[in-house]
Image (spheres, helix red, strand yellow):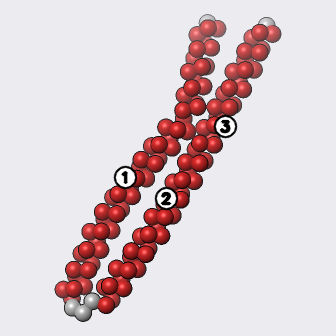
Amino acid sequence: MLNNFETIQKFNKEQLEAANAAAATLTKGLQKIAAEATDYSKAAFEKNSAAFEKLVAAKTPDAAFQIQSEFAKSAYEGFVAQVNKMGELYTSVAKEAFKPVEVAFTKATEVAKKAA
């Protein structure tokens, strides 16, 4: 009986450690994602401001149309690249955060098989 208690206690400790590791990894990953989103927002704002200044300085409607077209294309390409990058970050964070949980689940499965 004492051996079972020690096994359960060890198992619970391992589960808690796995949950703590997952939470720490998730927190770091979300901070990285937030920093990336902030950087993108700042860069986009600067590009938008520069495009607006060019647009205001345009001498003809054709020049304004050209500036707007180039800006729209650039903004779209930048957005698509950022969406892909953010998707990769989210995927990476999820994989890293749940590795400790996966290991703990595997150990729990092994313990359950031995107990049965």
| Amino acid of disc 3 | Asn
Callout 1 secondary element: helix
Residue 37 in picture, x, y percent from top left:
48, 60
Label 3, secondary structure: give it: helix
Q: Residue 59 sits in which quadrant?
A: bottom left
Measuring from the top left, give residue 54's x and y in whole percent.
32, 85
Vertical side of 90 occupied by 17: above or below: above
Tag shown at residue 20: 3
Task: Report the residue at 53% width, 57% height from top.
Answer: 34
The amino acid on which the numbered mark 1 sits, given as a three-letter code, is Asn
72 lies left or right of 39: left
The residue that disc 1 covers is: 84
Residue in the picture at 60% in, 38% down: 22
Q: Is residue 9 above or below residue 78?
A: above
Mark 2, residue position: 36
Per the model, the C-alpha gap separating discs 3 and 1 is 29 Å
The reply to whether discs 1 and 2 touch (Cβ–Cβ < 8 Å) is no
Return the disc, 3 or 1, that comes first in the chain's sequence: 3
Q: Residues within 10 Å of mark 2 (few under 14, many from 20)?
A: some
Which badge, 1 or 2, is on the more N-terminal residue? 2
Query: Is the residue 71 above or below the residue 63 in the image?
Result: above
Q: For the point 58% across and 44% down, which residue is it?
A: 26
The numbered mark, 2 or 3, whose residue comes first in the sequence reads 3
For residue 101, what is the image quadrant?
A: top right
* Left or right of 78 in this view: 62: left
Callout 1 crowding tier (Cα within 10 Å): few <14, some 14–19, many ≥20: few
Residue, x 33% and y 89% (percent of image)?
56
